[in-house]
Image: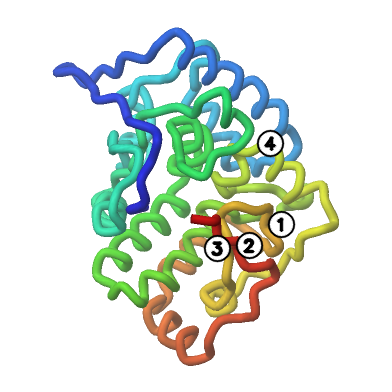
Amino acid sequence: MSKSSKYVSHQSDENGFIHWSTEEHQIWSELMQRQLSCIEGKACDEYLDGLKKLNLPLDRIPQLAEINAVLQPSTGWKVTEVPALISFDRFFQLLANKEFPVATFIRSREEFDYLQEPDVFHEIFGHCAMLTHPAFAEFTHTYGKLGLAASKEDRVYLARLYWFTIEFGLLNSKDGLRIYGGGVLSSPGETQYAIGSDAPERKVFDVVDVLRTPYRIDIMQPVYFMINSINDLFDVSQLDLMAMVQQARSLGLHAPKFPPKEKKAS
């Protein structure tokens, strides 16, 4: 989150309105139409219910106030505009205050299929629908409070919990395997890979196991973790998660299931 970004977020005007360009609205429209098609039969019911509540426009980027008009009555959450990248302190502080950070830029056409940084499409389409669900909202709030109070070393372990739930979580529903993680739901390649491929390992969710599992942000995930119900996240939020972090630290990390990232020549 502290690395530099080539993107610059738009700043809202005195009325909280963000002025997007015609091209930016067009990119949103194309991303929306593509991803709505991709997630058919793959997204969990709770996500689809949230998406209906949000009623996201197809032809333009929504204003954050439109999202808040749905989130705040649903779960007490709101979205807050942030620069393209923020510090971990700021990130945890926002979640602890029931504010979900939204970087107010949208990807370029050159990075239409994939970008490492979370843009407005990833944050709103990927995450906001799930924030209308009480169990998911409570888990995210608890996570923010824990992260805000945690040491730098413990935050590294907590990052894996966020990664394998809020970003890349899968759900074993009565209708089969479904997605609830925003990192998958906002990516066409990952959506197909997570559900339709035999390549990744899909493991039953276990907190300590999750905390010990390394990941890379720039590859398809070799491992996903599955819960049985979104309400499982509420149960997780009631556990002594920091004691589990200490247990995971004492046990050490699992061997990574991916090659090390190649260093760029200087």
Q: Which colour scheme is used?
A: rainbow
Report the number of numbered marks.
4
Q: Please rate how many residues cluster around mark 3, counting C-alpha atoms within 10 Å: few if below 14, some from 14 to 19, many from 20.
A: some
SS at badge 3: helix
Residue, disc 3:
232
Q: What residue type is labelled 4?
A: Pro
Residue, disc 4:
188
Please report the residue visible at 31 percent of the width from the left and 68 percent of the height from the top: 146
Q: Disc 4 vs disc 3: which is toward the camera?
A: 4
Q: Disc 2 vs disc 4: which is toward the camera?
A: 4
Looking at marks 2 and 1 on the same chain, the residue that comes earlier in the sequence is marked by 1
Asked if residue 140 is positioned above or below residue 160 in the image, the reply reads above
Label 2, label 4: how far apart the Cα atoms are: 22 Å
SS at badge 1: strand
Query: Residue 245: horizontal and vertical position, in percent?
Result: 43, 80
SS at badge 2: strand
Label 2, label 1: how far apart the Cα atoms are: 6 Å
Query: Residue 70: horizontal and vertical position, in percent?
Result: 38, 29
Looking at marks 3 and 1 on the same chain, the residue that comes earlier in the sequence is marked by 1
Residue nearer the viewer, 161 or 231? 161
Query: Residue 195: horizontal and vertical position, in percent?
Result: 76, 49
User: In the rendered structure, are the residues bearing label 2 and label 1 in contact, judged by CB atoms less than 8 Å apart?
Assistant: yes
User: In the rendered structure, are the residues bearing label 2 and label 3 in contact, judged by CB atoms less than 8 Å apart?
Assistant: yes
Q: Disc 1 vs disc 4: which is toward the camera?
A: 4
Q: Which amino acid does label 3 sit on?
A: Asp
Please report the residue visible at 67 percent of the width from the left and 41 percent of the height from the top: 43
Numbered circle sitting on residue 172: 1
